[in-house]
Amino acid sequence: MPNLKIATYNIHKGFSQFNRRVVMHELREKLRELDADIVFLQEVQGEHAHHAQRHAAYPEGPQYEFLADEVWGYHAYGMNAVYEAGHHGNAILSRYPILQTRNRDVSAHRFEQRGLLHCEIDFKGQSVHSFCAHFGLFAKGRRTQMNALIEHVRGEVDPSAPLVIAGDFNDWRDQLSQEFASELGVQDVFHIGHGKLARSFPSAFPMFKLDRIYVRGFAVDHCQVYGGRSLSDHAALLAELRKI
């Protein structure tokens, strides 16, 4: 079975750090450079009534469709935050068929609308359950969302099935990894590969360990942080996985 390349990226709704400019075209090129088979995206704009009128470079249609383009033939979107001008949420782009999709509301309070996007992906005849998550800014809310994720996985995923959970967990003190490991049997790919979590925020000079890729049923052959140019306030994470 071939290796599976996974990337996760908080794209900041397609605007550069500090919202100075639209970077959707550069983001699309960066994702193509990463060459991942499955891409987990957070803060994806599904619709906005005014951006295309105000910004000449802003693409028409949902951002996940623009980013997927001709490279990722399958995609799913989970609408989380809804407001008068539009909505945004999480998205998964995949080179492999997406068999089922479910989006679960895991908002801890009315001030932060958060969701959990669950896709079952057919990877060469093997179902890989893939979860794209974006947890809240406050510790109490993150624990609520962690418990909701654990409950959902236990209820919807066979314990022997391969599992990938990726996204922006805002877990800068690493209070969630140990419980994820004990409850779901998942490990962070950078902890497996390098013995420590990846620093991913802010992207220009990463200091905080906010973004993660947790896996079960895979060995990690390679993992890397892609920061540098301020296409987002987060850096992208990439991992190359081998089925075990």
Image (cartoon, rainbow, N blue to C red):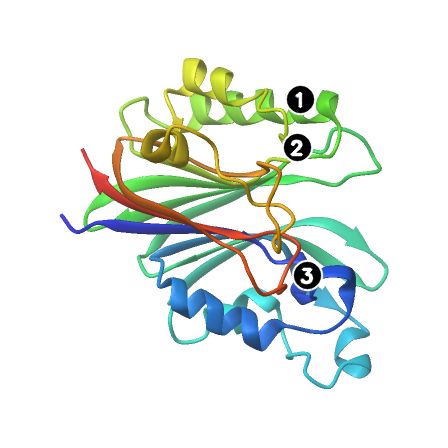
Q: Quadrant of residue 153?
A: top left
**Camera-side mark, 2 or 3:** 3
Give the spatial CA distance, label 2 vs label 1.
8 Å
Outermost residue to the top? 182
Instruction: Give the residue pinned by disc 1.
Output: 144
Q: Quadrant of residue 104?
A: top right
Relative image position of residue 46 (x, y in whole percent): 66, 62
Outermost residue to the bottom? 56
Relative image position of residue 201 (x, y in whole percent): 62, 45
**Relative height, residue 7 to residue 207 (above, below):** below
Instruction: Give the residue pinned by disc 3.
Output: 13
**Camera-side mark, 2 or 1:** 1
Identify the mark nearer the N-term, 2 or 1.
2
Labelled pair 2, 1 in contact (Cβ < 8 Å) = yes
Relative image position of residue 212 (x, y in whole percent): 49, 38
Question: Which of the numbered marks, if any, corresponds to residue 106?
Answer: 2
Mark 1 surroundings: few (<14), some (14-19) or many (≥20) residues within 10 A: some
In the image: residue 235, left or right of residue 55: left
In the image: residue 224, left or right of residue 179: left
Amino acid type at image mark 3: Lys
**Relative height, residue 230 to residue 39 (above, below):** below
Amino acid type at image mark 1: Thr
In the image: residue 108, left or right of residue 226: right
